[in-house]
Image (tube, rainbow, N blue to C red):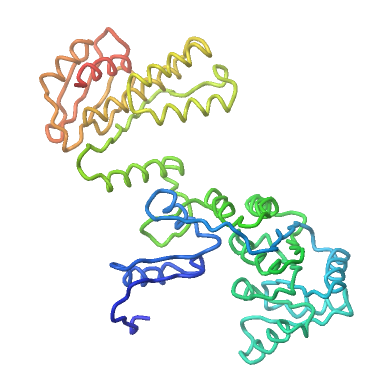
C-alpha cells in the first residue's frame, strides 16, 4: 500500500505473478525503478511471457520435479454419477481425499448434497469465500487433518493449499475456466508419491475456444508443463498491450504475427547504441492482387514457407534468388505472384532509401519519404524518367512524389528498377 516505505529496498520477489492485476503491477513499478525484481509463476500471463520471449525480460525455467512426483492423469468427461462414484470410491479405498471444485456459491450446497447421495460413506465439507473466517478455517483444518473425505469448494483452493493426501480432483463446468486457472487447480493434487487424477467435467456441447483450452490441459500432463501451457495460452489469447491495462488479447488492427514483428523491430531499435542504422521497411500498398494462387502452389505448407521466407528477407538480391527458386520449383510466376515479389522488392529497397510508404495503382504511384530522409530530387527525377515515368512533387518536406506512367515498363517493375538504381 502507498503508506509502506522502505529505507533501502534491494530486491522485490513476486510470487504467483499471474494473480496480480495491472494496478498492483503499476504500484510495483513505482517501487522497482532502481531495484532488482524476481517474479515467480507456474503459468505466466500472456503479456509477461511475451515480454520474455521478445527479450524485454529475462526468463529462467525450473523444470526439475520434486522426487517421486508423478504426472497428474487428466480426463475431460461429462458430469456422470457413475464416473464420480467410481473415482471417489477408488480414492477412499486407498485412504485418500478428493477436491470437488464448483465455482457457484448459489448451488454449491446442492452439489454437496448430491455427492452425499452418490457416495454415502464419504464425509463431505463445503468451503467458499463468503463463509465466516472461523467457519472456513474450521473446514480447511478438518480437510487437511483428514477428518473430511471430500472438500466441495470454489476457486479459493486454486493456489497455496498443500494437501498431499488429496490425489483426486473434479472441476465442474471446466469450460468456464481459463487455462492458467485449470493448470493451477490441477496442481493441488499429485503432491505426493501417489498417482493423481483430475477430471474436468463439461457438458456435451462447449464452445470452440473452451474445447481448445481443455484439449491443451488434456494433452500437456507431463511434469513442468506450465511453460508449454502458458505458450498455448499466449497463442490462443494473444500477447495483450505492453503499456495499457490489457494483459492478454490481440492487436486486431495489424494481426498477431505482424505485431510480433513490429515489436521485435522496436526492441532492436531501442537497444541500438547508434552504431548502426535501424532497418525500417517501406509500407507498400497495391490496388491489385499480390499473393500466391492455389492453382500455382497447391501445398499450404510450401506456400506458407515461401511467405515466411519472403517477409524475413532484407536484401533485394536475396528476394530475387527466392523468386528464381520459386520459378524453378513451380513454373512461371502468374501476375499475382509477380506482384507479391515486386512489393517485397519495394519494401526492402525503400528501407535503404528512407521511403516511408509506396502506393501503387494501375498507371500511377505515390512515394512518401520519411522526415529524416534527404533524397536528391535531381537523381530521383533522372531515374524515373529513365523508365518513362512523369514526376510531380506533391510535398517538399517530407518529400512526397506523384508518378505517372507514360509508357515502357509496367508500373511495379518500373518502380523497382528506378529505385534499385538509386541504392548506393
Q: Quadrant of the C terminus?
A: top left
Q: Going 56% across and 21% down the picture, which residue do you hit?
A: 294
Answer above or below: position of 127 versus 155. below
Quarter of the image for residue 315 reads top left
Residue 165 percent coordinates (x, y): 74, 74
Residue 128 percent coordinates (x, y): 65, 80
Quarter of the image for residue 383 reads top left
Residue 345 percent coordinates (x, y): 33, 22
User: Could you tell me how many numbered marks the image carries?
Assistant: 0
Answer above or below: position of 382 versus 213. above
Q: Going 46% across and 59% down the picture, which residue do you hit?
A: 247
- Considering every residue shown, the one lying at the far top of the view is 408
Q: Going 49% across and 70% down the picture, which residue do you hit?
A: 15
- Considering every residue shown, the one lying at the far bottom of the view is 134
Q: Nearer the viewer, residue 51 or 249?
A: 51
Quarter of the image for residue 179 reads bottom right
Q: Nearer the viewer, residue 198 or 127?
A: 198
In the drawing, does residue 352 fall left or right of residue 73? left
Q: Going 43% across and 19% down the picture, which residue do you hit?
A: 322
Q: Quadrant of the N terminus?
A: bottom left
Amino acid at each position: 500500500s502507498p503508506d509502506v516505505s522502505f529505507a533501502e529496498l534491494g530486491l522485490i520477489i513476486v510470487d504467483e505473478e499471474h494473480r496480480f492485476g495491472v494496478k498492483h503491477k503499476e504500484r510495483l513499478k513505482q517501487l522497482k525503478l532502481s531495484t532488482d525484481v524476481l517474479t515467480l509463476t507456474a503459468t505466466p500471463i500472456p503479456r509477461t511471457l511475451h515480454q520474455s520471449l521478445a527479450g524485454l525480460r529475462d526468463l529462467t525455467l525450473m523444470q526439475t520435479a520434486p522426487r517421486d512426483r508423478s504426472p497428474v492423469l487428466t480426463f475431460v468427461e461429462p458430469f456422470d454419477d457413475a464416473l464420480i462414484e467410481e473415482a471417489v470410491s477408488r480414492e477412499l479405498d486407498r485412504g485418500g481425499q478428493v477436491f470437488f471444485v464448483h465455482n457457484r456459491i448459489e448451488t454449491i450446497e446442492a452439489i454437496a448434497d448430491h455427492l452425499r447421495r452418490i457416495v454415502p460413506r464419504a464425509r463431505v465439507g463445503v468451503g467458499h469465500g463468503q463463509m465466516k473466517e472461523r467457519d472456513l478455517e474450521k473446514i480447511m483444518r478438518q480437510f487437511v487433518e483428514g477428518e473430511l473425505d471430500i472438500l466441495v469448494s470454489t476457486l479459493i483452493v486454486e493456489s497455496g493449499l498443500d494437501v498431499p493426501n488429496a490425489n483426486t480432483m473434479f472441476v465442474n463446468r471446466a469450460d468456464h475456466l481459463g487455462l492458467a486457472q485449470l493448470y493451477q487447480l490441477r496442481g493441488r493434487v499429485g503432491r505426493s508419491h501417489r498417482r493423481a487424477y483430475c477430471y474436468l467435467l463439461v457438458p456435451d456441447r462447449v464452445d470452440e475456444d473452451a474445447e481448445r483450452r481443455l484439449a491443451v490441459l488434456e494433452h500437456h500432463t507431463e511434469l513442468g508443463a506450465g511453460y508449454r501451457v502458458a505458450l498455448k495460452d499466449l497463442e490462443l489469447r494473444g500477447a495483450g498491450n505492453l503499456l495499457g491495462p490489457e494483459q492478454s488479447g490481440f492487436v486486431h488492427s495489424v494481426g498477431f504475427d505482424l505485431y510480433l514483428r513490429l515489436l521485435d523491430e522496436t526492441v532492436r531499435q531501442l537497444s541500438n547504441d547508434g552504431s548502426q542504422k535501424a532497418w525500417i521497411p517501406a509500407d507498400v500498398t497495391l490496388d491489385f492482387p499480390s499473393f500466391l494462387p492455389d492453382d500455382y502452389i497447391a501445398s499450404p505448407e510450401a506456400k506458407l514457407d515461401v511467405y515466411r521466407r519472403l517477409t524475413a528477407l532484407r536484401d533485394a538480391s536475396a528476394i530475387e534468388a527466392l523468386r528464381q527458386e520459386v520459378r524453378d520449383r513451380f513454373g512461371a510466376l502468374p501476375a499475382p505472384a509477380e506482384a507479391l515479389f515486386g512489393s517485397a522488392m519495394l519494401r526492402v529497397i525503400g528501407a535503404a532509401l528512407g521511403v516511408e510508404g509506396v502506393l501503387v495503382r494501375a498507371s500511377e504511384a505515390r512515394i512518401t519519404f520519411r522526415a529524416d530522409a534527404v533524397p536528391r530530387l535531381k537523381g530521383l527525377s533522372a531515374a524515373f524518367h529513365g523508365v518513362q515515368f512523369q514526376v510531380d512533387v506533391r510535398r517538399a518536406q517530407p518529400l512526397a512524389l506523384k508518378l505517372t506512367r507514360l509508357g515502357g515498363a509496367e508500373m511495379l517493375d518500373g518502380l523497382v528498377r528506378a529505385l534499385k538504381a538509386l541504392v548506393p
